[in-house]
Image (cartoon, coloured by chain):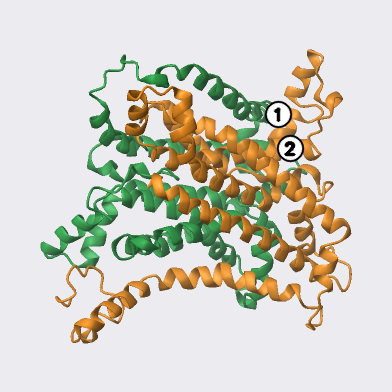
Amino acid sequence: MTADTAPAVAPGPAAAGPGARPGRPRHSTLRSARDWAGLLPFGVYVGLGLILPTIAIIIGAFQTDDGAWTLSNINTALHGVYLHGLEVSLELSVITAIIPGIIGFLIAYAIFTARRGSMLRRVTITASGTFANFGGVPLAFLFIATLGTTGIATGWLSAIGLNPYDHGFNLYTFSGVALVYMYFQIPLMVLVILPSLEGLRPAWREATSNLGASSWQYWRYVGGPVLMPAFLGCVLLLFGSALSAYATAQALTSGSIPLTSIQIGSFLNGNVLAGQTNVGKALALLMVLIIAVAMSLYALAQRRAAKWLQ
Amino acid sequence: MAAVVGQQLAGELAPVPPRVRTGAIRRFPYWRWIILVIAGLYFALPLYAGFRFAGISSFPSVASQEGFSAAFTLSLRLAAITTVLTLVLMVPTVIWVHLRLPKVRRIMETITILPIVIPPVVLILGVLEVSPAQLKASANLLALLYVVLAMPFAYRALDAGLRALDLKTLVEASNSLGGGMGTTLWRIILPNLRTALLSATVLTVALVLGEFTMASLDQYQTFPVWIVAFDQTSGPISVAASLAALIVTWIVLMLISMIGGRGGRGGRGAGATLFSVARREPPGGS
């Protein structure tokens, strides 16, 4: 390994050779080029696996079945059932981002204050990792066994005269889907907010305490403002996660409530009217746009959060 | 898991005797338990209902059902390919970022979070559009896509594991003792990252064994797709299969966190599991 590039650990693929030696001024540019080259495999993979498919969708959204340019797909996607689907999707995602966001935060804070390495912490964090990935049909099954018309909890509640189905609840409609989504949204929130909580320094708490502040004042003037950007960022993430959920709602309602992700899925399954093949892509494009806005805000929030937390 | 971080912190916190009344922290446990109990009920109830519905006798018979072994084998194969690819791609990348491009970390965090929010339906739609026909005809396409889906979890586990290490010092020490890059990676960094690697692996495997959307839309009968299809034949066995998958994942994660929490140096990457992040850079690290 050439000695002049001092702490050179990893020889960057080709660049480690004589090229790095002569000019001191060029040295740093070369080295930074080499540093960036190390990201190439990852970049290429993300490019092919994530960016390219997205671009293909964006292009397809503006084409007819024969490949001519058109705006009619977008137009269709913004009217009628599809517009309604978008509205319901957004509504569902907002609700299942905010409520689980708050609950998840409280749980994360509760275990954050528990002794480190304690069983409680361990169980909660590993459970969060497991449940955050649990969704789809198996989850729908479990809830049908619990709160379906003949479910266990439904039975218990009816026994005390509170049959949820008499009070506007139905597992197979909006309220039911929202309740089921929380099953993976809350654990996801616990997982993503915990690192930020770990960034809260005990010294801040002690300092406010020494200055005579109450717990409320600590949260109002120190903890709350410091955590707020991180919290909002995580809620945006939950929003995206809810928006992209497909299998759970599909299994639970068989498509009876209109959600954009399910509508896109039905295009893939071939349930399409002639001449509308690319409407699915237009819907996908709209989703990507919504996600892009949410993620930009997320990045912004992360940057604000980083000021204090990391 | 956070136990290691815990150990470092324990030193700082230990002098404070537990009985000292530090502001509201003492009063807290009261509502902490209320929240945890309610949450516990919400999460346990459906599991209980599932067990009741499936019945104990369904569990042993899952493996002997028609189609199970084909579907499970396919899922295991995909899990193996995905895990190897994910580790080969992500481990060097994350180490590289930590060593050479610490400034890029925030960008990496944002990029790797994308697969959580980009809808799988959208992704598979685009992928089927651009991928060459040969690839489309093979189930391996799914493995390639699962690598993308696994990134959020793999990246965070590895990143957290590396943060808990004083990577620069380790690498410099290894170099000054004559270790080349390969030696440093194999004999210094990877052993220190054991727990992080383990949790990245488990999360990846769990993801592959549970992924339904892409597999079903790409029309391959993986384990989750089989579970759904088999529901037509026997509901209880379907539910038993999904419960078994869930609980096995959880137990394995628990085991990892116990191993990681147990101690000494080996556990250093343990702060790692999942999204949990180690405390802070050691002083001097940027």
Say left or right for B91 vs B99: right
Residue A86 point in image, percent of width and height: 78, 54
The chain whose colour is green is: B
Name the residue carrying label 1.
Answer: B53
Three-letter amino acid code of the residue under disc 2? Gly
Question: Nearest the camera: B80 or B62?
Answer: B80
The chain whose colour is orange is: A
Residue B67 appearing in the image: no
- Residue drawn at (26%, 69%), measured in percent from left and top? A10
Question: Nearest the camera: B253 or A54?
Answer: A54
Residue B99 point in image, percent of width and height: 29, 62
Dots 1 and 2: beta carbons under 8 Å? yes
Image quadrant holding the C terminus of chain B, namely bottom left
Say left or right for A172 vs B38: right
Residue A134 point in image, percent of width and height: 60, 42
Residue B235's disc is 2
Question: Relative to B263, is B180 above or below?
Answer: below
- Residue drawn at (31%, 74%), measured in percent from left and top? A32
Say left or right for A24 vs A107: left
Residue A266 appearing in the image: yes
Q: CA distance from mark 1 to mark 2?
A: 9 Å
Protein chain holding label 1: B
Three-letter amino acid code of the residue under disc 1? Phe
| Residue found at the far front of this picture | A211
* Quadrant in the picture for residue A276: bottom right
